[in-house]
Amino acid sequence: MARGRGRRVRRVVLGGPLWDRLGPAFLPVVPDLVANELVAAREGIRVEGSVVGVQVAAQGAAELVMDHFLAPRASALMVD
């Protein structure tokens, strides 16, 4: 099987600084909207709210910084 083929979305996690207020209104309707947008594998998708809370944006920004410094780069593996 080719890489990436046969994979499917199993879970969609939503969050953000206003999620604690918006989640109760959005969670009941979002699963149908997500399923309608997918081309394949529409069954069995879980849509849930993030447990990270209001700090999700700060955590994501910190992860980007850490990724920049800690992730291996192909150019670093090249020998001159």
Image: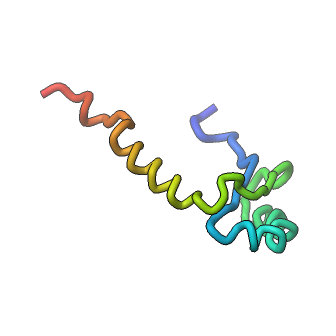
Above or below 42: residue 34: below
- Please tell me which residue is depicted at 70% across the width and 67% down the height of the picture: 19
The chosen color scheme is: rainbow
Rendering coords of residue 15 (x, y %): 67, 62
- The answer to which quarter of the image holds residue 49 is bottom right
Lateral position of residue 30 relative to residue 77, left or right = right
Rendering coords of residue 56 (x, y %): 58, 58
Above or below 1: residue 24: below
Where is the N terminus found, in terms of image quarters? top right
Above or below 75: residue 64: below
Say how many tags the image has. 0
- Please tell me which residue is depicted at 87% across the width and 68% down the height of the picture: 28
Above or below 2: residue 50: below
Q: List the single residue furthest toward the left.
A: 80
Please state which of residues 16 and 34 is positioned toward the viewer in this rendering.
16
Where is the C terminus found, in terms of image quarters? top left
- Please tell me which residue is depicted at 65% across the width and 53% down the height of the picture: 52
Please state which of residues 11 and 6 is positioned toward the viewer in this rendering.
11
Lateral position of residue 15 relative to residue 34, left or right = left
Rendering coords of residue 55 (x, y %): 58, 59
Rendering coords of residue 16 (x, y %): 63, 65
